[in-house]
Image: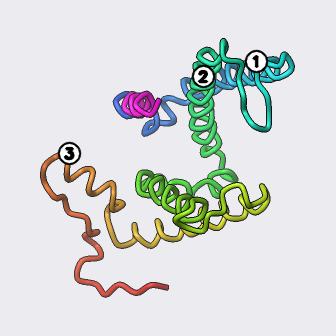
C-alpha cells in the first residue's frame, strides 16, 4: 500500500500534475470526481456489509470467508480517498478564501516525511506503555484535542525550521543518502546571521 502511494507521488511528479495546476485543473477535477464517487460507493458497501452482519462494530470483526475481499476493498478505499483529498485540497487552494486557510499545509508539506515520523513518535510516547500509556483510556474528544495541539506544534516547528534550513532534517538525510553526497541544508540567506527564536 505504502509503495503504491510512493508510485502515485512519483507519477504526479513526473507528469507535473501538481506543479502546473492551471494547466492540469481539468484533470484534477476529473480525478476528484471519479475518486469521490468510488469512495462513496465503497462506503455504502461497508454499510451494507455491516447491516448484513459480515462486519461488526465498534470492534471490527469480519466473517472469515470475507476477510480477504474486505481487506482488498479497504485498501482501494484508502487509495481513492487519499487521491480525493489531495485533488480536493489543490482545487480549493485556487480559491482566495481557502488559499489563506490551507496555506500553512504547504509549510508542513515541505517537511512531510519529518512530520510523519514526528507524529509516530508523539503517538508512541502518548499512547504506548513505554510512554504515558493512554491507549484506550482517552475519549474521542480528548484525542481530537491532542491531535490539534500536535498539529500546531508541528506547524510552528516546520515554520521555524524552514526559515533557517532549505529542507526538513529527514528529507535532507534521505536526499543525501540517495545521492551519496551530503547536500547543503542551511538557507543561503541565513548563513552568517544570528538566529533568534521568537
**Residue 107 seen in render:** no
- Secondary element at tag 1: helix
Q: Mark 2: which secondary structure? A: helix
Along the horizontal axis of the image, is 26 left or right of 172?
Answer: right
- Mark in the foreground, 2 or 3: 2
Q: Residue at x 42, y 54 (%)?
A: 110
Up-down relation of residue 128 to residue 11 (above or below): below
Q: Which residues are magenta?
A: 1-12
Residue pushed farthest top?
65
Q: Quick one: 18 or 126, which is closer to the camera?
A: 126
Which residue extends farthest right? 51
- Most frequent secondary structure within the magenta stretch: helix
Chain-order first, disc 3 or disc 1:
1
Residue 149: mark in rendering: none
| Label 2 – label 3 distance at C-alpha | 33 Å
Q: Earlier in the sequence, mark 1 or mark 2?
A: 1
Of circles 1 and 2, the one toward us is 2
Give the vertical position of 141 relative to 63 (above or below). below
Task: Using the image as rendered, state which of residue 90 and residue 121 is in the foreground.
Answer: 121
* Distance of label 1 from label 2 (alpha carbons): 13 Å
Q: Which mark is residue 71?
A: 2
Q: Position of residue 35 (x, y in %)?
A: 63, 23
Residue 189's place in the image compared with 8, above or below, is below
Residue pointed to by mark 3: 178
Q: Which residue is mark 1?
A: 45
Cα distance between the residues tagged 3 and 1: 42 Å
Amino acid at each position: 500500500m505504502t509503495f503504491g502511494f510512493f508510485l502515485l507521488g512519483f507519477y504526479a511528479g513526473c507528469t507535473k500534475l501538481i506543479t502546473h495546476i492551471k494547466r492540469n485543473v481539468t484533470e484534477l477535477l476529473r480525478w476528484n470526481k471519479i475518486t469521490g464517487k468510488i469512495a462513496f460507493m465503497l462506503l455504502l458497501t461497508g454499510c451494507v456489509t455491516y447491516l448484513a452482519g459480515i462486519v461488526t462494530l465498534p470492534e471490527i470483526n469480519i466473517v472469515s470467508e470475507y476477510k480477504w475481499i474486505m481487506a482488498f476493498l479497504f485498501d482501494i478505499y484508502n487509495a481513492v480517498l487519499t487521491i480525493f483529498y489531495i485533488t480536493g485540497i489543490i482545487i480549493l487552494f485556487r480559491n482566495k478564501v481557502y488559499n489563506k486557510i490551507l496555506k500553512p499545509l504547504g509549510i508542513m508539506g515541505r517537511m512531510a516525511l519529518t512530520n510523519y515520523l514526528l507524529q509516530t513518535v508523539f503517538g508512541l510516547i502518548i499512547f504506548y506503555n513505554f510512554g504515558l500509556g493512554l491507549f484506550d483510556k482517552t475519549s474521542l474528544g480528548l484525542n481530537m484535542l491532542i491531535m490539534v495541539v500536535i498539529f500546531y506544534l508541528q506547524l510552528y516547528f516546520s515554520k521555524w525550521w524552514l526559515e533557517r534550513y532549505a529542507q526538513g532534517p529527514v528529507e535532507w538525510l534521505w536526499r543525501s543518502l540517495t545521492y551519496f553526497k551530503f547536500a547543503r541544508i542551511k538557507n543561503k540567506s541565513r548563513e552568517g546571521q544570528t538566529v533568534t527564536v521568537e
